[in-house]
Image (cartoon, rainbow, N blue to C red):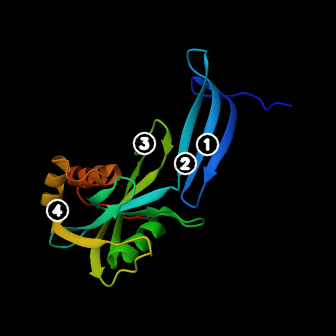
Amino acid sequence: MSSPIQQHGPWQIIESREVYRDPWTRLRRDEVIRPDGNPGTYSVVDLKPGVSVLAIDDDDNAYLTEEFHYGVGRVTIETVSGGIEEGEDACTTAERELQEELGISATRWTDLGSVDPFTANVVSPTRLFLAESLTTGKPQLEGTELIRCVKLPFQRVVAMTMAGEITHAPSAVLILKVALTGKRGNCG
């Protein structure tokens, strides 16, 4: 018995098969009828939902991470980012990741919404947060992380983003949202 065809926007999914899975990534391959009516295949990567956090102190300095990222094969400067664990809400994840990666805690949080960094064939929803009223401490890095804290004036961070020096899409969106909207509201 075949499963029913599922409508997916202008596409029709005939069959969906998981071809790979690990704790962070799932790859599925769909047999489809394309919008033009022809058969085809479409692969989709599902990543764990995540957060990106921009920490700014009372002197308007931003705290970013500098880290080698395996996927792009180079060192990047970006906001604190990490995956939402099962049973954890996004705000709790943001607090945890900021503490783990930079050793920073914050008492004022602003939820700036979500972004989908890739929309064609990657599912990777990312929630954006601004953290303020900071207290610094010691990071608690995971074995896969070798992170250096970068403290820069926020306006320099905006300029770096506009110059293409910060290329991590959720970081760029978060930095520019904060620059355009200012700091207001609370997570909760």
Q: What residue type is labelled 4?
A: Phe
Q: Which mark is residue 46?
A: 2
Query: Badge 4 is on which residue?
Result: 154
In three-dimensional space, the C-alpha distance between marks 2 and 4, rounded to whole angstroms, equals: 32 Å
Which of these two is toward me, 71 or 16?
A: 71
Quadrant of image for the N terminus = top right
Which of these two is toward me, 5 or 89?
A: 5
- The spot of residue 46 in percent (x, y) is 54, 48
Which-is-in-front pick, marks 3 and 1? Answer: 1
Taking the spot 79% from the left edge, 32% from the top edge, the residue there is 3
Q: What element carries label 4?
A: helix
Which residue is farthest front?
73
The reply to whether dot 3 and dot 4 touch (C-beta < 8 Å) is no
Please state the total of marks drawn on the protein image: 4
Quadrant of image for the C terminus = bottom left
Task: Name the N-terminal-most of marks 2 and 3.
Answer: 2
Q: What element carries label 3?
A: loop
Where is residue 11, by image quadrant? top right
Where is residue 155, by image quadrant? bottom left
Which-is-in-front pick, marks 3 and 4? Answer: 3
The reply to whether dot 1 and dot 2 touch (C-beta < 8 Å) is yes
In three-dimensional space, the C-alpha distance between marks 3 and 4, rounded to whole angstroms, equals: 26 Å
Left or right side of 154 for 4: right
In three-dimensional space, the C-alpha distance between marks 1 and 2, rounded to whole angstroms, equals: 8 Å
Query: Badge 1 is on which residue?
Result: 28
Q: Is mark 1 on a helix, strand or loop?
A: strand
Task: Name the N-terminal-most of marks 3 and 1.
Answer: 1
Left or right side of 134 for 163: left
Query: Badge 3 is on which residue?
Result: 118
Q: Which amino acid does label 3 sit on?
A: Phe
Q: Residues within 10 Å of mark 1 (few under 14, many from 20)?
A: some
Left or right side of 85 for 171: left
